[in-house]
Amino acid sequence: MTKIIMDTDPGIDDAAALSVAINNPELDVELVTTVAGNVTVDKTTINALKIINFFGKGTEIPVAAGAVQPLIKPFEDAARIHGESGMSGYDFHGELPKPLKETAVQAMHRVIMASDEPITLVATGSYTNVALLFAEYPEVKDKLERIVAMGGTLGCGNMTSAAEFNVFTDPHAAKMMYQSGVPIVMVGLDVTKKALVTPETLAEIETMNPAGKMLHDLIISDGDRNEHGVAMHDVNTIFYLLHPEFMTTKKLWIDIQTEGPANGETVADIRGAYHDGQTNADVCLDIDAEAFNDWFKAEVKKMK
């Protein structure tokens, strides 16, 4: 079993990733932390609690609220994609558990240092909490197995032609994370725009079980779609954790642009020419989209 912390900004695709993670027996979700990203952090925290409460795990999986804004850059949300609440499309019921009184950074530090085995940090929002954690508690780096981070692209961005949303939201935090020395898997648009949840998959999960209905209603409300399906970017991080054999990766050095019109761009040293042959990330370049859809349906079917 892999111990993970999910640092997230629900967000519809974050909600789907969290749903899979907390229901898969191969993953032990030790903590969920939230950050401003798709919507403001008060909303992302409520949304994380809604998902955890939906599956009856409110007393098992703690949630800690994190950064309210990026380190330097002005905050810009993605409510145009996820709706004003961040999780439009489904009406959640029931009284929500309370988040921890600790900040996300404090909770991450405590959980990581107390663990008897290395923890994998799954980052599916902007990386502000991660950067603050490393700045305040650099000792945690040696206790992390790796970071699996949704974000970045070697091709075309989705905020500008150069930049993907999570990195664009807080490029200075992304730069700190990629310079941390912790092993990183970059799960970017190069794969997430290929592994769309298809209309056929959505039709199947709608009638599978209550979780399938909930996820169906959220996903069809997501604005990041085309005629071939809906991009569930963050779910790809969990797919990688459980089935890396269905992704093609390459070790590269990734730099982050923090100024100018290319702000938020993830720049890869594709020739290994500028960093003495060193690399700082395993970058996902391709994915088996059919296997992704089959896996996602199987995961939803197991949910209770």
Image (cartoon, helix red, strand yellow):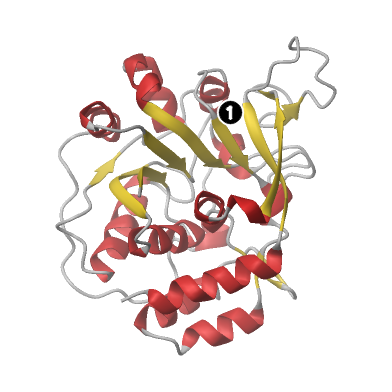
Residue 48: image quadrant is bottom left
- For label 1, the residue is 171
Amino acid residing under circle 1: Pro
Q: How many marks?
A: 1
Give the residue displayed 41% in from the left and 38% down from the top.
120
Query: 284 or 91: nearer the eye?
Result: 284
Asked if residue 168 is positioned above or below residue 28 in the image, the reply reads: above
Q: Give the left or right position of residue 226, taking residue 8 as reference.
A: right
Task: Name the residue furthest bottom.
Answer: 207
For the question of whether residue 247 can be seen, the reply is: yes
Tell me which residue sits at (38%, 85%) in the image. Answer: 209
Task: Choose between 287 and 126: the one closer to the eye.
Answer: 287
The residue lying at 46 percent from left, 70 percent from top is 299
Residue drawn at x 50%, y 82% as measured from the top left: 205
The x and y percentages for residue 1 are 35, 50
View extreme (top): residue: 276
Name the spot of residue 138 as percent of width and height, x first: 36, 15
Residue 49 x, y percent position in the rendering: 27, 58
Against 55, is 266 above or below?
above
Q: Depth check: 67 or 112 in front?
A: 112
Is residue 43 or residue 111 the one in the foreground?
Answer: 111
Q: Is residue 89 visible?
A: no
